[in-house]
Amino acid sequence: QSNMTYILSTIILAVCLALLMNTKWLAHFSSKLKSPKSEGRKPTLFDVRQFIIEGDVEIAIELYREIFKVSYEDSKTAVSELAKSIHPNLDN
């Protein structure tokens, strides 16, 4: 009975840990679901701005890359500057 309790506790702990680790992934995935492409329209700089406001900076960077056909680093820099204009007190 002690072994069964240990196994059951380990399984429950593993499931909880997996759920916690996937929380950020799920948030990222749900943001992708509401992307302009999923709505059947072309993404715009307004969409990039909206993702920045919502805190989805990585999605904003990827969207910026798609719109302007630039490298990841250039896109990251541009999105960072845009974020500073939206949130002037933001230190990046």
Image (cartoon, helix red, strand yellow):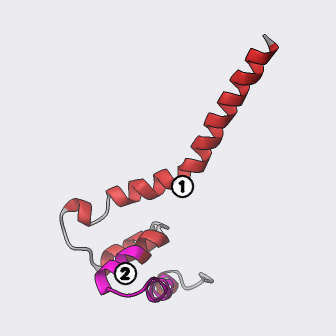
Residue 91 locus on image (x, y percent): 63, 83
Residue type beneath disc 2: Arg
Looking at the image, residue 25 lies above or below residue 92: above
The reply to whether the magenta stretch includes residue 53 is: no
Q: Is residue 34 left or right of residue 52?
A: left
Magenta region, mostly helix, strand or loop? helix
Res 82 → quadrant: bottom left
Residue 47 locus on image (x, y percent): 32, 73
- The residue identified by callout 1 is 24
Q: Which residue lies furthest to the front in this view?
A: 3
- Image point (61%, 46%), residue name: 20
- Image point (54%, 55%), residue name: 24
Of residues 54 and 12, the one nearer the viewer is 12
Magenta part of the protein: which range? 62-83
Res 69 → quadrant: bottom left
Q: Is residue 20 left or right of residue 60?
A: right
Looking at the image, residue 69 lies above or below residue 40: below
- The residue identified by callout 2 is 65
Residue 15 locus on image (x, y percent): 61, 35
The reply to whether the magenta stretch includes residue 75 is: yes
Of residues 76 and 34, the one nearer the viewer is 76
